[in-house]
Image (cartoon, helix red, strand yellow):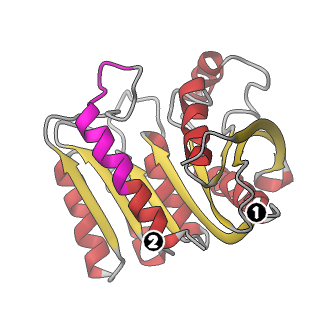
Amino acid sequence: MSEELTAQTVGIAGFGGDDIEAYLAVPDDGATARGSVVVIHHMPGYDSSSKEIVRKFAANGYAAMMPNLYYREAPGASPDDAAATARANGGVPDERLVGDVAGAADYLRSLQNSNGKVGVIGYCSGGRQSFLAACSLNLDAAVDCYGAFIMSSPPEGMPLKAGPIGDLAPQLSCPLLGLFGADDKYPTPAETAELSKVLDEHAKPHEFHTYDGAGHAFFSVDRPAYRPEASTDGWQRIWDFYGRYLAS
């Protein structure tokens, strides 16, 4: 792990060729080839805690990029205002999400030190979107951190308007790591077990881990839901997983 990195805001071509904002962090370690990670932010948006995750990947040797999924609705707005606008619209359309992740992956592959391998990781709504991207694009590894509504639809009254996508499981393009909380309601352990069963039926490699005493957002160090033991173990599993599938 190195603390030497460069982080900056850049423009990328997203869905439909739209110019959107993205946050990029790359290691300053002189490596000749490295894997890359597309970070999909949570429902609260393109915020400082999500940018810290991007820098964390760079500090651990990966080029990382987080596209601003709400940029079209609220360019230049604060993360809270942009997230409020996105919620009012029911979230990000699935087709647009896939196009934005594809644009980020293409950008990362074009970097001078890329080894051509790209993974994806998402938290909360981004966990569902990580699975969606991995079933829609050719990727090398995917991580789903407590992503709900893969096997079911959101309940009435929830701002997210998204249908189940479990039927995409046969198209999963890469190994999947899932990290969940036993006390989470979205997704519940029953939902993640159902997804695991479907993936088994289609012989899709995956590793799911559910943490006792943890609920939703247990990785979030700035929220009451933070669970240090689950988060520490989860990060170690992420490093091991990406080390296997994204290393040169």
| Residue 76 at x, y percent in the picture | 79, 21
**Location of residue 59 by image quarter:** top right
* Nearest to the observer: residue 228 or residue 153: 228
Secondary element at tag 1:
helix
Q: Is residue 148 shown to the viewer in this render? A: no
| Residue 56 at x, y percent in the picture | 55, 41
Q: Which residue is mark 2?
A: 244
- Direction from residue 171 to residue 64 in the image, left or right: right
Q: Which residue is mark 1?
A: 106
Sequence-first disc among 1 and 2: 1
- How crowded pointer 1 is (Cα within 10 Å; few <14, some 14-19, many 20+) is rated as some
| Residue 38 at x, y percent in the picture | 61, 53
Tell me if residue 143 comes above or below residue 159 in the rendering: below
* Nearest to the observer: residue 227 or residue 112: 112
Highlighted magenta segment, given as a residue range: 223-237
Distance CA(mark 1)–CA(mark 2): 21 Å
Q: Amino acid at mark 1?
A: Asp
Residue at x 39% of width, y 25% of height: 221
Residue at x 67% of width, y 51% of height: 96
| Residue 71 at x, y percent in the picture | 74, 33
